[in-house]
Image (spheres, grey):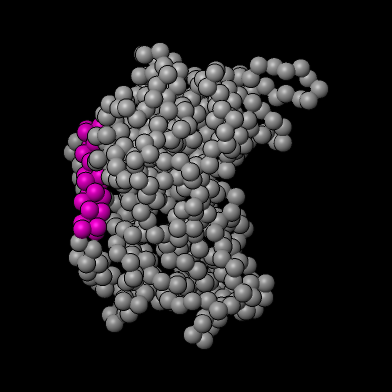
Amino acid sequence: MTSPVRQRRDEPETTPEHVDVLIIGAGLSGIGAAAHLTRELPRTSYVVLEAREVSGGTWDLFHYPGVRSDSDMFTMGYRFRPWRHEEALGSGERILEYLRDTAREYDVESHIRYRHRVVRASWDSDTALWTVEAEVDGEPVTLTAGFLWSCRGYYDYERGHEPEFPGRDEFGGPIVHPQHWPADLDWADQEVVVIGSGATAVTVVPAMASDARHVTMLQRSPTYVLSLPHRDPFATRVRRWLPAGTAHRLVRWKSIVVQAVFYRLSRRRPGLVKRLVRKQNLALLPEGYDVDTHFTPRYDPWDQRMCFVPDADLFRAVRRGDVDVVTGTIERFDANGIVLTDGRHLHADLIITATGLRLSPFGGIELVVDGRMVDPADEMTYRALMLSGVPNFVFTVGYTNASWTLKVDLVADFTCRLLAHMSAHGYRSVTPLRDPTVGEMPLMDFTSGYVVRALDQLPHQGDREPWRLRQSYLRDRRTIRRADLEDGVLSFT
């Protein structure tokens, strides 16, 4: 495709480049969206605008030790392109390789415009077009598109969440957030304190333990942690005896069903799942370990996302004595470490603040519809992929209780079906029309800190279909992929 026109103030106006579909973001969601378009609607013109200099999104951004998926790769991989490696929890390096190989295989790479930071998107009903304004090295670039597809996820790539710790400036060593891991950071033979107990912390801690003198995982409260095999024995056997395509479908569906059953059991019988998790933890930790203090959360399973560790690496590090888990609250930092409110002192040469991520819904992009500024927090989501009152706009946000990519594939299926339906009937625009009788609910029924901190920025869901988000792939597979598009909610013109 041709390069976008860069218009200087002293040049005459030129016609912006136009595409049928403009995708924002070249990470897991954006590459998947573009590949689906190539596969299902090959005559559709599209471009992918990526703010960073490389593709891969999260999987290129994070470089902390041990970075890997926290979902099995048989469902974290795209439905149309099998994950061929043996490990169930894939390393960040291999996931990035998988994404970029997918982009090359489906010629997505040639459609990506790097260093294009989208700042504003304006819809005009008279022309049925989006005008998208981006910045490239400080210069403005404008494109138009018939359809806008946001695939940038919801994380703030600029900075992670870091609470204000009293005395931070007094500490004599480095303080590092995993989102901004220095390439030259050396922790060999040092005492390290990792603040946090979520997916990043339980990944970083055992990865650093092999070289550090000692690692302490300091948590305000515990998280559910389960061990999974690094290599799925079922997948290994099936791949040995069945053709590759058949094996992929069978292993993928096994993972989908296991995830769904475990989540449903967790919500319906939380006490049982608590006991099962505790039993596994007891078996993996040293005899007499205080599992109730350090590994038994106050909340129910899947109120927050569970953490999965490969081959019990965190528990094995605790058993060896390389890692201590400390549960307590921070009073202040001092020159040599961290003082807790109960008076204990944790010595540290290096502090890692694995304190979470910040959400940036829709990337802070200004959305304007016919001159009206759209605040996503005032809108309701249609099937958790469109915004009420916003025409020709789809966004991709994955599941909190299953692999992100399961939802990526479903949103792409819906969008391709919707575009084909509009083309077949001569429609130029489609808008979800909000029903005032539908009650509002928070978009995510989830108590993780990064969600709670951003609830006032997120759109709402409704109290009934098709405005309700069920967090169920099996249910969404039926509704999103097969539901009638002419449902009385989507308004076509």
**Towards the viewer: 288 or 490:** 490
Q: Residue at x 54, y 38 (%)?
A: 374
Which secondary structure type mostly characterizes the magenta part of the structure?
helix
| Region in magenta | 243-268
Toward the viewer: 84 or 106? Answer: 106
Left or right of residue 421: residue 453: right
Q: Quadrant of residue 307?
A: bottom left
Q: Does the magenta segment cover residue 249?
A: yes
Residue farthest to the front, as pictured: 437
Residue 127 point in image, percent of width and height:
55, 17
Rendering quarter of residue 485: top left
Residue at image location 27% in from the left, 26% down from the top = 484
Residue 200 appearing in the image: no
x then y, percent, for residue 493? 42, 19
Residue at 56% x, 62% y is: 162
Q: Is residue 384 visible?
A: yes
Q: Position of residue 260 (x, y in %)?
A: 24, 49
